[in-house]
């Protein structure tokens, strides 16, 4: 993906086992997906799919602190892109 690309799609497939997730990644590799795929281990990562209202509420709550975080920056960047998706 080019840095200029504003969006990319992902797939959330609930209920997979670790083996099935790895098989899905292997399938993508066999199809020569340009950017590849990776397995996200739920024991190590929290992955959230949040709607815009929830993201805005989270950003407001985070803004109450003075600490600047990469998460706050990422959230603001996403909201900015949502305002002008093209």
Image: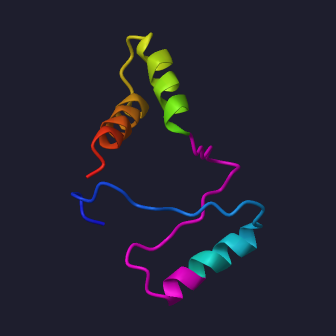
Q: Is residue 54 above or below residue 20?
A: above
Q: Is residue 30 above or below residue 11?
A: below
Residue 48 position within the rendered picture, expressed as x and y whole percent measured from the top left: 59, 43
Q: Does the magenta segment cover residue 39? A: yes
Location of residue 13 (image quadrant): bottom right
In what quadrant of the picture does the N terminus appear? bottom left
Residue drawn where x is 51% and y is 23% of the image: 57
Location of residue 20 (image quadrant): bottom right
Residue 65 position within the rendered picture, expressed as x and y whole percent measured from the top left: 43, 11
Residue drawn where x is 58% and y is 76% of the image: 25
Q: Does the magenta segment cover residue 83? A: no
Q: Is residue 51 above or below residue 60?
A: below
Q: Which residues are magenta?
A: 27-50
Residue 34 position within the rendered picture, expressed as x and y whole percent measured from the top left: 37, 78
| Left/right of residue 74 with respect to residue 57 in the rendered view | left
Q: Predominant secondary structure in magenta?
A: loop
Residue drawn where x is 36% and y is 56% of the image: 7
Residue 18 position within the rendered picture, expressed as x and y whole percent measured from the top left: 73, 67
Near-viewer residue (60 or 22): 60
| Left/right of residue 26 with respect to residue 61 in the rendered view | right
Name the residue at the left extreme: 4
């Amino acid at each position: 993906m080019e840095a200029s690309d504003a969006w990319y799609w992902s797939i959330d497939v609930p209920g997979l086992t670790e083996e099935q997730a790895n098989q899905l990644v292997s399938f993508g590799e066999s199809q020569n997906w340009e950017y590849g795929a990776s397995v996200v281990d739920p024991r190590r990562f929290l992955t959230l799919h949040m709607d815009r209202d929830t993201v805005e509420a989270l950003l407001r709550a985070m803004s109450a602190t003075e600490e600047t975080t990469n998460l706050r920056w990422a959230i603001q960047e996403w909201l900015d892109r949502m305002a002008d998706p093209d």
